[in-house]
Amino acid sequence: MRKIIVKLLVFLAFAQGNSQILDPVKWTTKIEKKSETNYILTFNGVIEKEWHMYSQFTPDGGPLAMEVIFTNQKGNFNLIGKAKEGKTTTAYNDVFEVNETFFVKNAQIQQEISLTNPKIKTIEVALNYQVCKQSCINLEKKFSFVIPSVAKTEIVPIQTDTIENEVITSKAEKITKEITKESKEIEVPSKSESQKGLWSIFLIAFLSGFAALLTPCVFPMIPMTVSFFTKQSKTRAKGIENAIIYGISIIAIYVILGLVVTWIFGADALNALSTNVWFNIIFFLLLIVFAISFLGAFEIMLPNSWANKVDSQADRGGIIGILFMALALAIVSFSCTGPIVGTLLVEAASKGGIAPIIGMFGFSLALALPFMLFAMFPGWLQSLPKSGGWLNTVKVVLGFLELALAFKFLSNADLVLQLHLLEREVFLVIWIAIFGTLAFYLFGKITLPHDSPMAHISVGRLSLGLVVLSFTIYMIPGLWGAPLKLINAFPPPMEYSESPFGFGSSGNISSTTILPDGAKLGPHQIVVFDDYDKGLKYAKTVKKPIMLDFTGFACVNCRKMENNVWSDERVLSILKNDIVLISLYVDDKRELPKSEQFISKTTGSEIETIGDKWTDFMITKYKTNTQPLYVLTDLKGNSLNETTPTISYTSVDEYESWLKTGIAKFKK
């Protein structure tokens, strides 16, 4: 009864004035009895036009992925696999530089459970998710499924302790439409944009296939294989036909490998696995092993018995024999192609969907083309360079590249765990060391176990060495805060560093400047607090107005505002010099101390995390739940902009005007 009264008061409060509590997803649920102990829980969401909601399989480092949390699971029931999803869309997000997965118009989630406690009456579930358009909203919905006593489907009404289901009124929806009409909408990635990730995977895989072709395990097999076809075939036409079948067989083998990987793990699950902390660590260790193998410490080989059995089948002739010849190539060359294929599958998995299949097609196409072309035009064999030490050089270069890529995966895990073990400077030092050593190797100053004696270096090797050395020197200023746009997607962000200014100084603040207690350097080297009390204390000391920035780690439009609006020199000057910036992250999952946890008087929700605390503050004081949200206040917490107390995703001119208006009032 108390909760009903509290929510009724909340409803009345938010039904008046300019309520902006938005809830773009309306849910219904059902429970189906599958067997005596197994049940299927279904969530159906209808998403308002132009909004989109992120899936469970949106990767870490991108927008906030959905979480399905079973709050009374322990001792009562087990989950059968991961929650399944209905139709989703995958598209590249150029802000977070990941392929995000999201629902448009409709969302369906299904979870099968198996009861272990026959006395349980209800299944309690919470959905945590992010929905975005011109702003982003992080929502938690709570559901209670009543266990049916008979084998039939039951429609269960949504039950929730959060305000989102019950506060929205027709008036609020009307206001939402007015806000939407006046605001700049987020650009939902188009279908053509969603293909960019697959095209990039194909191109990388295709180039990797050519790189594999130039290794000691594969290159010498080209003239041997072509000679076999030309000698065994009675006519030139038959030789060409056999070579084409051979090339198609190579492609089929690797594409089937991509299909198997996708089928075993599932198209969406691959994405989730590849962005998991522990799988990133496993990928790191795997690539380290591949790199050490390429550098010559050992060879990764499949059992010789496999090659012998397959080779014996290749003598059967006909299409079956050619297929086994292609399989023999894959097995014999595994010590060189295996690490490349493994790396490609890891990288493709991070894209999700059919990326592993596209990757294997691109790789195998590049590998198969030379065999087919040289069989069609045997005279070209005369133009092929002779095998020699240069083949091992290619293998070693690939080893260095594998080593560098490995640390990208370790960095992903470190960023998610926020351990700060591999911050930007450390990452760049490692890459500078790797590519610097590679440059010395190419210049002949370092030799490895399988290198041939070398009296001089070739022009090609010298040229490649100069390119690598130039790249190494290019990275060095990054230690002093240079943006390094050419490799921006690889190292950790500027903010994730020992000092955002590197070892020297940059911008308006010296690296030796002592930051105020509780402050750090945020986007564009702005001094920012993430604790309200410490920020308020500092603002009182310097007698400047406060700008509250309600934001999120996974808020795409927050990043767009920071990248496109905050970076403008007019706005940036104000943010650095005229206000005290306090950024409050509504998706901060760190748990509050037990003594600071409470039940919200406004919403009746349990406030357990730092993000919950700032969300409740935003809803209670400013009657909204959207991010980004900016508020200019005086030192007593009163809004300085009377006509427009808060502002969200907007243009540079409007943002600058809003800032100046509030600051002018503060100075009166």
Image: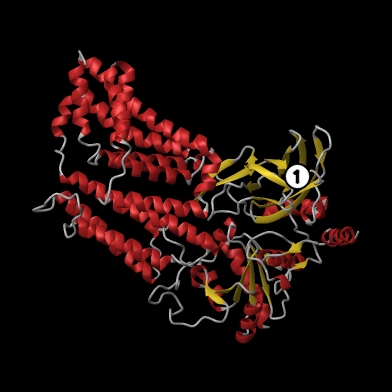
Q: Quadrant of the C terminus?
A: bottom right
> Residue at 52% across / 45% down in the picture?
271
> Residue at 52% across / 52% down in the picture?
276
Which one is nearer the viewer's eye here, 366 or 644? 366
Task: Left or right? Give the position of 476 relative to 15.
Answer: left
> Residue at 77% across / 54% down in the picture?
164
Label tally? 1
Residue 100: give x, y in percent of width and height: 55, 47
Which one is nearer the viewer's eye here, 376 or 547? 376
On screen, residue 435 above or below 351: below
Residue 358: give x, y in percent of width and height: 43, 36
Which one is nearer the viewer's eye here, 374 or 300? 300
> Residue at 56% across / 77% down in the picture?
519
Residue sticking out furthest to the bottom: 541
On screen, residue 548 above or below 171: below
The residue beneath circle 1 is 27
Residue 292: give x, y in percent of width and height: 30, 52
Badge 1 density bin: few <14, some 14–19, many ≥20, Cα 10 Å? some
Residue type beneath disc 1: Trp
Residue 657 visible somewhere in the drawing:
yes
Task: Left or right? Give the position of 375 relative to 164.
Answer: left
Which one is nearer the viewer's eye here, 229 or 551? 229
Q: Quadrant of the N terminus?
A: bottom right
